Image (cartoon, rainbow, N blue to C red):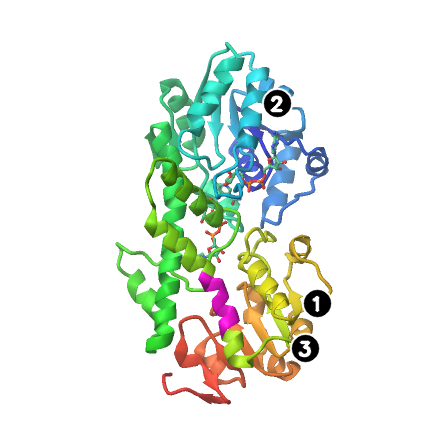
Amino acid sequence: MNIAVIGTGYVGLVSGVCFSEIGNQVICVDNNEEKVQMLNEGIVPIYEPGLKELMTSNMQAGKLAFTSNIGEAIHQSDIVFIAVGTPSLPNGEANLSYVEQVAYEIGTHLESYKIIVTKSTVPVGTNDRIRDLIRNISSQPFDVASVPEFLREGSAIKDTLNPDRIVIGTSSERAIQTLKKLHRPLTSNLIITDIRSAEMIKYASNAFLATKISFINEISNICEKVGADVTRVAEGMGYDKRIGSAFLKAGIGYGGSCFPKDTQALIQIAGMVDYDFRLLKSVVQVNQDQRMQVIYKLQEALGSLAGKTIAIWGLAFKPDTDDVRDAPAIDIVQHLIDAGATVKAYDPIATDNFRKEIDIASISWEDSPLHAAQDADALCVLTEWKEFAQVDLTTLAQTMKEPVMIDGRNVYSAEQIQASAFHYYSVGRPGLVKLEGKATAII
Ligand SMILES: NC(=O)c1ccc[n+]([C@@H]2O[C@H](COP(=O)([O-])OP(=O)(O)OC[C@H]3O[C@@H](n4cnc5c(N)ncnc54)[C@H](O)[C@@H]3O)[C@@H](O)[C@H]2O)c1
Ligand SMILES: O=c1ccn([C@@H]2O[C@H](COP(=O)(O)OP(=O)(O)O[C@H]3O[C@H](CO)[C@@H](O)[C@H](O)[C@H]3O)[C@@H](O)[C@H]2O)c(=O)[nH]1
């Protein structure tokens, strides 16, 4: 099939590449001309394992192209995917200006029947608005459908080529048949539903996953007080098929471009229809507080943070991505700076993006984990990059001024910590806290 994908962020680019990989003719559009030029030169603007290879091979096979000319792309396609951003407005609502702009441009370029599919995460009712907007501009035939995207950054290609399900929300039989045919090579689990339910499935899914994370983070905080180990608690819970083991990793709270924004947006969507989504509001609050646990533990270990040197390992919101959008590290580093500390930061790939968020003299940007830790009063592990688990803890402790570690992602095992000199704070594993070089009673 001939497909136009509007927007070459994570979703647009990965979808475009994967649709070409399964045999379609794809043209990706972005109004950022610099980005289009880079893509045409085979340069991938995001870090995603395997994406460059797949993109290049499909471009060379003539199945994938990039342009800033939306009209040309629409003329060549049967299906138009909208995959532009829907960032948060200051009140938490989704900003639909990019989606509406694209809908307007599609309307002005329609010259024959198209299926217009929204992949962007949009509030319930948005696809109806897109339909009205286009209908006001064009008398050409078209159908709209909501096909929300569930890919995760870092495993985006695998998620797209092997999805758990594809949700197709539309009232058009013609669109259903075409979209079924398009997606069947990816999975047989196609959920056909109405547009509003499809839009809601996306928000409800993200909100539920965020709820699981805040739930286990609260359990971890209680574990710390009652002497239980949250990793064993999560394991024991996860074997229950009704609960499932995924998304029960306690840490410093969720970040990224989706959970923070989509939970806020769903609270707003509920508010618009006079519903107070109390549970989700608590999930968001717990998540914000969880970031502060790192600071509380540092204060417990060091007292005042003024004048202290703190090493930070990990700036990305999770491993295998250079994305720092709403990363917990942003709040934590900002707090340390406000408290008068000096920060030595290291991330294998996200440093450049992080510096666009905060770049001040009291932060030094280090080129290795050990350089960041050198002469530091404490180390905070904020992203579970694989290379951190491989660092020799004896060498690390000797490099630091004080062997104090706040492991915000439970990277290290009990054995590694017991064999080390570290005064160690984990998340929800209080038996591993060492005080004055001696393990506490609960091991
Ligand atoms: N990032 C993810 O992992 C992910 C996963 C699932 C769903 N989503 C949702 O998908 C949507 C896109 O997310 P993203 O992270 O890919 O977005 P992004 O903001 O990273 O990228 C959007 C792209 O659209 C382009 N754009 C904006 N207006 C345009 C226009 N008028 N014409 C052409 N191009 C235009 C921008 O230049 C940019 O390259 C959002 O609604 C998001 O919530 C994201
Ligand atoms: O057990 C867990 C799992 C995740 N996280 C954190 O949660 C955040 C989000 O992680 P993840 O879901 O893996 O990354 P995203 O790429 O943001 O993907 C989410 O957001 C996307 C955008 O909507 C959806 O498409 C995906 O299905 C959904 O998983 C990260 O900060 C993780 O560190 C935890 O703290 N504990």
Q: Is residue 437 above or below residue 56?
A: below
Give the residue type that dot 2 points to. Ala
- State whether residue 163 appears in this view: no
Q: Residue at x 71, y 33 (%)?
A: 33
In this picture, residue 55 sits left or right of residue 86: right
Q: Nearer the viewer, mark 3 or mark 2?
A: 3
Going from N to C along the chain, the mark reached first, 1 or 2, is 2
Question: In the image, is residue 434 part of the stretch drawn in magenta?
Answer: no
Question: In the image, is residue 292 part of the stretch drawn in magenta?
Answer: yes
Q: Which mark is residue 362?
A: 1
Judge the density around disc 2: few (<14), some (14-19), many (≥20) Cα neighbours within 10 Å.
many
Where does the image place residue 286, in percent across and percent down from the top left? 41, 59
- What element does badge 2 sit on? helix
Q: Residue at x 56, y 71 (%)?
A: 380
Q: Residue at x 54, y 76 (%)?
A: 405
Q: Is residue 352 above or below residue 416?
A: above
Q: Nearer the viewer, mark 1 or mark 2?
A: 1
Q: Spatial distance from mark 3 to mark 2, Cα to Cα? A: 53 Å
In this picture, residue 193 sits left or right of residue 264: left
Going from N to C along the chain, the mark reached first, 3 or 2, is 2
Q: Which residues are magenta?
A: 289-296
- State whether residue 124 appears in this view: yes
Judge the density around disc 1: few (<14), some (14-19), many (≥20) Cα neighbours within 10 Å.
some
Q: Which mark is residue 73?
A: 2
- Is the stretch drawn in magenta largely helix, strand or loop? helix
Where does the image place residue 222, in percent across and percent down from the top left? 35, 71
Is the C-beta separation of discs 1 and 2 under 8 Å? no
Going from N to C along the chain, the mark reached first, 1 or 3, is 1
Q: Which mark is residue 374?
A: 3
